[in-house]
Amino acid sequence: MVKNPKEEYVKYLRDKMLQERNPPLKSCTDSNVFLYYIPPKECENNKNLEAQNYTNNLSLCVLIRDGNEQILFPGDLMKDGMEFIIKHNSSLRNKLKDGISILIAPHHGLKSSFSTYLFQHIKNEKTYRLNIVSEKITTPDSNRVVDTRYSSTDFCQGKNNFSTTDNPVYQRKTSNGHIIIDTSVFPVTFKSEKDINVILKSF
C-alpha cells in the first residue's frame, strides 16, 4: 500500500535507519519461538480489518516459550488485527490457553489497541507475571493514552519480583527504564535499568 516505494522517506529508512540497527542477537530454535502474522493482501482486503489499521496490523506477533514461561510480543497489532490472528491460528489459540507470563502490550499499551479478545483467550483471562508497556514519551496534550487496564489485577496476577505484599505490580512502563527479563533463574526475575549500555553488556 506504499504509494511510491521510491519516495525519499522510504529511501531514508532503508539507507539510514536499518544500518543503525545492530542489537546483540542470539539464535533460537523454532521449537520455542512462534511467529504469527496477517498476510499483507489479506490485511488489505479483509472486510473485518479496518483500512486505517493496515500498517500496524502487518506487525509480526511473536510468542516465545522458555520452560513454563510464555512471552507474547504482539508488535503494533490493533484490536481488529489481534482478534483476526487469534481466530485464524489454532496454534496460537492453544498456546494462549497454556497461559501468558509476560505480555509486551500491543502498540505501546495505547487504549486503541487494548484487546479484551486476547485476554478472553489467555488462561485465567490475565497474564501471570507482568504486562510491559513500551511507552513513548508524550506531551500533556498528546492523545497517546496508555490503557490503565494493563495495571489492574483484572488483567495480571502480578507474580514478579517488582511486587510486594503491600504493593503488587501488574504493569511496568519502559519510560521508567528498560526492562531485563532473566529467564535463566526460577522464578523469572525482572530488572529495570535506564542505561542502555548496562543492558547491552548483560547480553
Image: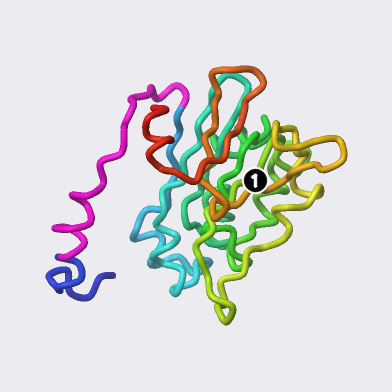
Note whether 114 is above or below 159 in the view shown: below
Q: Quadrant of the C terminus?
A: top left
**Residue 185: image x %, image y %?**
59, 17
Q: Which residues are magenta?
A: 12-32
- In this rendered view, identify the residue nearer to me: 177 or 121: 177
Residue 74 is left or right of residue 157, and the answer is: left
Seen at 14% across and 65% down, the residue is: 11
- Image quarter where the N terminus lies is bottom left
Rendered residue at 86%/35% (across/down): 165
Where is residue 60? Give x, y as percent. Answer: 41, 48
Q: Residue at x 14, y 73 (%)?
A: 8
Q: How many marks?
A: 1
Which secondary structure lies at badge 1? strand
Residue found at the far right of this picture: 166
73 vs 59, left or right, is right
Amino acid residing under circle 1: Asn
From the viewer's perspective, tell me whether residue 124 is left or right of residue 122: right
Task: Describe the colour scheme in one phrase.
Answer: rainbow
Say if 77 sits above or below 155 in the image. below
3 or 178: nearer the viewer: 178
Q: Residue furthest bottom?
A: 141
Residue 18 counted in the magenta span: yes
Could you say which is closer to the camera, residue 111 or residue 47?
A: 111
Q: Circle 1: is it few (<14), some (14-19), or many (20+) Cα within 10 Å?
A: many
Residue at image coords 34%, 58%: 40
Q: Does residue 97 belong to the magenta stretch?
A: no
Name the residue that disc number 1 marks: 131
Image position of 34 with respect to 6: above or below: above
Q: Position of residue 41 (x, y in %)?
A: 34, 60
